[in-house]
Image (spheres, rainbow, N blue to C red):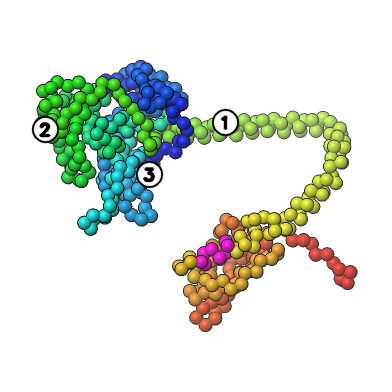
């Protein structure tokens, strides 16, 4: 599953550009902020429009499927995970749900009422797996859908009827947030379009999504007869909207990145890394050959110069090496991750709590510069001891500090088992100096 939630935190108010599917043609909008956008050009294909850095591309309604859904709220399960199960169960994520590109917004939450479970109303959009080549563009910062970037009706909840590339689109909003977009089958506004809208609204009401829609905002000029027909068939009051388009930037950022663009970016990234590696490899190889040639031409001079340059450094190097050796030997005192308290915390962590991960009682913890000794007892059998030893040996905080044995020696004591784990330290040990009485 690829959720199209964007983690981009850059400032988007410095400059804002938008490629938007207009009523008949693709439109380019530009301004200092989403609220101050102005039209700056139109074209039959989005490739023919300007594409400055950071531009946002809006897919037309035919490029995605949207459906508001109620999802159960379960402890420990995210809204995205619940929505994924719901969308997959309805077949909206296609034959390969793992490769589907989709995103969602949580619109509102409904508490427990009349014995019903707590649930969330989510607005989601699933990108179609096969897109028009005209919509696969390079250099796009984010991929959005029009309904999320357009202003909601003045009342905050309602329906908006607008034209998009020659087709009529119905956008539904709930409390000022986008909920659903649907491309009407009807080519012209009239009785067929009114019945289609009424059927969609009835479905929403039946599923308990909303009963508060009162207005149908018309974003295109229509005759009074058509407006009256729509009002009669939909049960909504028709309101003529403003002629100019208004945009906003949603609080939650989406990026419905097409699979083709994602694969292309990955390929370009791999190629760039490969070119970088080849460049460094060639430069290194050339440097090696140059150095080899110099050493072959003047070996005596090079050796003499090197000996002369290193001679003053040898005492300092020996001192540094000895100091490093001492610091390694004192690792338990100088390295916070290798201190006694830190090691004790890592060793005892899976043994704590009301229901510890390993039901073992720690009886001895010996921390020394040469080795670590852990003793304990358990009444749950030898497998628990083996699992505990496996945990210690795989703990990344302890792996570089000790050499763990393959098995923990133990013995049975009544109904339980005791064990001893001895792990030598990886730190170098100081050499034992022979005393004056040693032989």
x 56%, y 34%: residue = 274
- Residue 412 among magenta residues: no
Mark number, residue 233: 2
- Reading the image, the residue beneath label 3 is 1
Q: Can residue 372 be seen?
A: yes
Q: CA distance from mark 2 to mark 1?
A: 63 Å
Q: Position of residue 436 (x, y in %)?
A: 89, 69
Nearest-to-viewer mark from 1 and 3:
3
Q: Quadrant of the N terminus?
A: top left
Q: Position of residue 160 (x, y in %)?
A: 23, 30
The image quadrant that residue 7 belongs to is top left
**Callout 1: SS:** helix
The first of marks 2 and 1 along the sequence is 2
Q: Position of residue 117 (x, y in %)?
A: 26, 55
- Reading the image, the residue beneath label 1 is 275
**Callout 3: SS:** loop
Pointers 2 and 1 in contact (C-beta within 8 Å): no
The first of marks 1 and 3 along the sequence is 3
Magenta region: which residues?
345-352
Seen from the viewer's position, the closer of residues 212 and 97 is 212
Q: CA distance from mark 1 to mark 3?
A: 31 Å
């Amino acid at each position: 599953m690829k959720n199209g939630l964007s983690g981009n935190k850059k400032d988007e108010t410095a400059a804002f550009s938008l490629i938007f599917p207009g009523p008949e043609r693709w439109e380019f909008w530009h301004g200092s902020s989403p609220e101050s956008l102005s039209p700056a050009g139109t074209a039959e294909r989005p490739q023919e429009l300007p594409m400055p850095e950071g531009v946002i591309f809006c897919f037309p309604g035919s490029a995605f499927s949207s459906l508001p859904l109620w999802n159960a709220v379960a402890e420990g399960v995210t809204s995205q995970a619940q929505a994924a199960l719901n969308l997959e169960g309805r077949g909206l994520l296609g034959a390969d749900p793992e490769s589907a590109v989709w995103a969602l917004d949580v619109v509102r939450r409904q508490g427990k009422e009349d014995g019903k479970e707590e649930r969330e109303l989510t607005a989601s959009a699933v990108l179609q797996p096969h897109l028009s080549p005209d919509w696969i563009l390079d250099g796009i910062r984010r991929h959005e859908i029009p309904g999320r970037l357009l202003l909601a009706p003045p009342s905050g909840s309602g329906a908006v009827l607008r034209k998009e590339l020659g087709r009529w689109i119905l956008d539904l909003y709930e409390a000022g947030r986008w909920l659903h977009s649907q491309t009407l089958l009807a080519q012209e506004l009239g009785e067929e379009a009114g019945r289609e809208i009424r059927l969609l609204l009835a479905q929403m009401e039946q599923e308990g999504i909303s009963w508060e829609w009162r207005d149908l905002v018309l974003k295109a000029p229509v005759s009074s007869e058509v407006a009256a027909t729509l009002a009669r068939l939909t049960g909504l009051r028709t309101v003529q909207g403003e002629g100019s388009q208004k945009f906003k930037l949603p609080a939650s950022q989406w990026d419905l990145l097409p699979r083709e663009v994602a694969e292309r970016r990955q390929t370009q990234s791999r190629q760039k890394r490969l070119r970088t590696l080849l460049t460094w490899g060639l430069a290194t190889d050339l440097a090696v050959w140059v150095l080899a040639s110099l050493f072959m031409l003047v070996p005596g001079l090079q050796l003499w110069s090197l000996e002369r340059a290193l001679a003053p450094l040898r005492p300092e190097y020996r001192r540094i090496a000895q100091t490093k050796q001492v610091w390694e030997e004192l690792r338990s005192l100088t390295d916070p991750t290798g201190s006694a308290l830190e090691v004790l915390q890592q060793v005892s962590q899976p043994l704590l709590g009301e229901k510890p991960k390993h039901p073992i009682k720690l009886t001895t913890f010996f921390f020394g510069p040469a080795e670590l000794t852990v003793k304990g007892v358990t009444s749950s059998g030898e497998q628990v001891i083996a699992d505990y030893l496996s945990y210690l040996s795989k703990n990344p905080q302890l792996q570089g500090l000790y050499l763990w044995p393959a098995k923990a020696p133990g013995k049975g004591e009544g109904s339980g088992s005791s064990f001893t784990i001895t792990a030598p330290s990886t730190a170098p040990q100081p050499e034992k100096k022979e005393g004056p009485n040693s032989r």
